[in-house]
Image (spheres, rainbow, N blue to C red):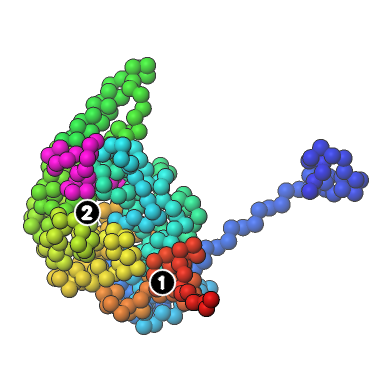
Amino acid sequence: MNRRLRGLSAPPLAAAALAAVVFAPPIAAPAAAAPAVHAFVGARVIPIAGPEIADGVLVIEGGTIAAVGARGEVAVPPGAEVHDVAGKVILPGLVDTHTHVGEVEGGDDSAPLHPEARALDAVDVRHPGIQRAQAGGITTVNVMPGSGHLMSGQTIYLKLRDGDTIGELSIPDADGNPMGGMKMANGTNSRRDPPFPGTRAKSASLVRQRFVAAQDYLDKRERLAGDPAEQPARDLGNEALGEVLSGERMVHHHTHRHDDVMTVLRLKEEFGFRVVLHHVSDAAKVAEEIAAAGVPVSAILVDSPGGKLEARDLLLENAAALERAGVLTALHSDDWITDSRLFLRMAGLAVRAGMSREGALRAVTLSGAQMLDLADRVGSLEPGKDADFAILSGDPLSVYTEVLETWVEGERVFDRGNPQDRLWAEGGWGAGEPRAHVACFEEVAP
């Protein structure tokens, strides 16, 4: 420790040493280390944005994809770390458009609409759900508050990097703000005792009133921009709804029954916001209407067995019906409804029920990226995009296939060969969390 800097006198030798440091010429900063280069050679590569490559090469440099193509057409850069992945399959990192990992919370029981509540302030990024999702090959998620409110708050888009704070996982927009949408819901979940609505008609009327109030607030703010004294006080909820009304913030709308779907489409037409329909148990009944409205769907094919009555007509064929109608269709886990580790099986079920293989694989990658306004970064293996991908043991639609490795922006975040990671992949409830998971008990005789 430098005693002089603490106001203490220093011995002569120490003082001389200090002078040498203070008056020495500046030392040039070391050159920045070159980004790590990895080449994955020999796998069947499924780029999503193009045809499958039987014997492929994927080159990543730092956190970005540098090249992808067939062996012999794509050169392995000198000095690259070469990974022999012959017999394996490489797929873009999966995009889950609707999950609740991290024990996220939104609005409370004080009101049915909470546009000001932020998932940003309520995600536990050290929760084992994050590692379970990585073990399922998922690299990008839309973390949603629950659906017990007409508006439960702002969602947050995360990259499943290894990090200790929400800032290390959040995805910034062009202004550096965390990206996310607005979670809304209708149907059974939000119909409760006052102050919540008791009917579907009252639910829709409350949403309309809230949007009209936001329009009035924004109009007054604009009209009185030159007179700060007369401007209304800041309202965080109205500001968030202003982002919805301008199209900056996507609405992610929980809805199941056919009439509830049509209510959402009317609200979208009336107020002009962008919306993704989530769940949509009755999708096959209103697929043409959804297509005509130009609205995308994030579907779930397995939902709450024995749960809400409005999901009774849920069909595995929904994704296929939406695809035939020309609707942009993604799939989601709604974790814990479907375990993130089994997310690829959702695509397999969709194909079994009539969806095309190409459509199902897009539904867990690029289609979801489009719904999150992230298709320029994730969802396919293309040069310039983020180096997010999963290495699989076999075909992505086979029930026997395992996720072997998951990479996010050029960093491996899951490795099935690592005992701890294998526990995340295969353990039961609370796997990998010392406070919750106990592998077995040994009975001790009295």
Is residue 235 at all visible to an observer of this figure? yes
The extreme front residue here reads 446
- Dot label at residue 427: 1
Q: Secondary structure at mark 1?
A: loop
Task: Tell whether 50 sits left or right of 287.
Answer: right
| Quadrant of residue 232 within the rendered picture | top left
Mark 1 vs mark 2: which is more N-terminal?
2
Task: Tell whether 107 sits left or right of 205.
Answer: right
Give the x, y percent position of residue 315.
14, 64
Above or below for 318 versus 292: below
Indicate whether residue 4 is drawn in magenta: no
Task: Tell me what residue is drawn at x 40 percent, y 73 percent.
Answer: 426
Given residues 201 and 142, the one toward you in this image is 201
| Predominant SS of the magenta segment | loop
Q: Residues within 10 Å of mark 2 (few under 14, many from 20)?
A: many
Above or below for 271 versus 351: above
Q: Amino acid at mark 2?
A: His
Q: Which residue is mark 2?
A: 278
Which residues make up the magenta segment?
179-202
| Quadrant of residue 394 within the rendered picture | bottom left
Q: Amino acid at mark 1?
A: Gly
Task: Tell me what residue is drawn at x 27 percent, y 27 percent.
Answer: 217
